[in-house]
Image: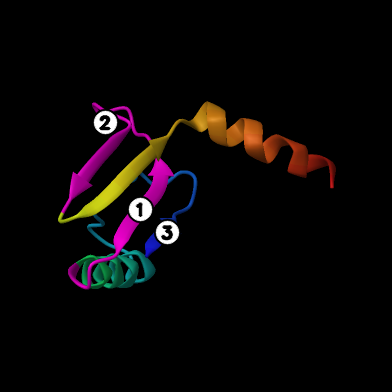
Amino acid sequence: MKIAFADYPYIPAEPPKSGAVRLVSYALARRLVQLGHEVLFYGAKAAYHQTDESVEEGIRYRRITAAWIDSVLEPLNYL
């Protein structure tokens, strides 16, 4: 099964170092990978990231630029 997690748009897409919800989500994602599922984490691309995507411990991290996030969220300002 393919499973995606989405983090806050300002949180870098990478294994977490802190944050209760992020750490629990990370533990769940690692367990799902061990069970044979394909796991994808969406998050922000920080200035220090070399690539838009990476895989660590079987979890794929897809990084999205702030400009793209802003273009998606902008229409919500008019609701």
**Residue closest to the eye, 50 or 62:** 62
Mark 1 closeness class: few <14, some 14–19, many ≥20 residues within 10 Å: many
Amino acid at the residue labelled 2: His
Identify which residue is drawn at 45% across, 30% down.
65
Amino acid at the residue labelled 3: Phe
Q: Residue 40 carries which label?
A: 1
2 is within the stretch colored magenta: no
Q: Residue 2's quadrant in the figure?
A: bottom left
Coordinates of residue 14 in the picture (x, y in percent) = 27, 48
Identify which residue is drawn at 27% across, 70% down.
32
Identify which residue is drawn at 36% across, 41% down.
62
> Would you say the residues marked 3 and 2 are in contact, meaning their CB atoms lie under 8 Å apart?
no
Residue 49 visible in the shown view: yes
Q: Is residue 35 left or right of residue 64?
A: left
The disc, 2 or 1, on the residue closer to the chain's N-terminal end is: 1
Cα distance between the residues tagged 2 and 1: 17 Å
Identify which residue is drawn at 32% across, 58% down.
39
Q: The magenta stretch spans which residues?
A: 34-56
Coordinates of residue 13 in the picture (x, y in percent) = 33, 46
In the rendered image, the quadrant that contains the N terminus is bottom left
